[in-house]
Amino acid sequence: MSLLGLPPELWVLFVSFGFMVGVFFGFFGMGGSFLVTPTLLILGYPAPVAIGSSMAFVFGTAVIATLKHDDVGQVDYKLGGLMFAGIVLGIEVGKMLVFGLEELGRAELVVGVAYVLLLAAIGLVFTHNALSRGNEDDAAGESGGDPDDIPELAKTIKSYDVPPMVTLTDGSRASMWVISGVGGGVGVVSGFLGVGGGVIRMPAIYYLVGVPLAAAVGTSLFGALMSGAVGAFSYGLSGVIDVGVVTALLLGSAFGARIGSASTAYVDEEDVTIYFGIMLLLASAAVALGELATWLGTPVLDRVSFVLLIGSAAFVTATILYYGTRAVREGRDAPAVG
């Protein structure tokens, strides 16, 4: 018996995994879509199906996130619209690369290796930031940083007027070449790997375009919405999106995101960030083991890879829930003690 092409055990698996990804999204502000494609690859889904399904999942989660940030005025729709052409072109280029590699029988290998490098890089950044957060917080406290300030790199780029120049919603000006470059570059990554591209887009908007951090996060999520919509439509036309997988993931993530968002009121992100970084490093190792299993024809390594990826995600989810539950209990007990 199956529903939307998925047997009951896979429904349980994908809803549960979607819940974990939703918790990450709600707590860290990152959709965790960079875990969906490698998981599907490890489970044996063809690269185009894994990427297309991930893009559809990105769209669903980004809609919720964008509306949430729009409520507090943190989305620059004009900048997002200007990036749209670059995103569309970039996604098509990324998709062409995937299908070209698929014809050569190399798509799973190349995408898998790309994910090993991507997850390792992001994991190292998160782990490094978690370990050095104390010093950074001390420095920020002494300097009293302005939330509307932008990095020196962005100020340097903005000092050069390279026409055509456009005026953004906050009144600042930016070169259309920079905006198109950011949109196109992130579009290629999204179309090739099936991710929203937030881990690349948000820093690019902040450091290159020069948008204040809060607006950069909201605008990046709007970009993820556009990337997901265009990617899902493009891959959908090719008939490679697994509706059952996407539906199960979205059901789980919708609930998980609410839990993750609620946890931010009780859990200090610094307590969990290092675990998130370590999880990404383990996920990188899991994808590498999956590729090695394919080369060696060793099913045992495939199972180890799957357990490592799902297990590390489950551990971080449990850590967030543990800290949140403990904080709530301590908060309820506090009045009685006083």
Image (spheres, rainbow, N blue to C red):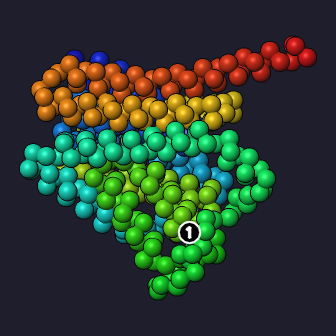
Report whether 321 appears left or right of 309: right
Tell me the residue at 63%/65% (across/down).
150
Location of residue 79 with respect to 145 vertically, above or below: below
User: Where does the C terminus fall, quadrant-wise?
Assistant: top right
Work out which quarter of the rendered image holds the N terminus and state it: top left
Task: Indicate whether 256 appears above or below 115.
Answer: above
Q: Residue furthest left?
A: 104
Q: Is residue 209 above or below residue 40?
A: below
| Residue drawn at 53 percent across, 75 percent down | 157
Front position in the image: 71 or 188 = 188
Which residue is disc 1 drawn over? 153
Q: Position of residue 48 (x, y in %)?
A: 21, 45
Residue 188: quadrant of the picture: bottom left
Q: Is residue 139 above or below residue 330?
A: below
Amino acid type, label 1: Leu
Q: What residue is at 64 percent from the left and 75 percent from the top?
A: 171
Residue 93: give x, y in percent of width and height: 25, 62
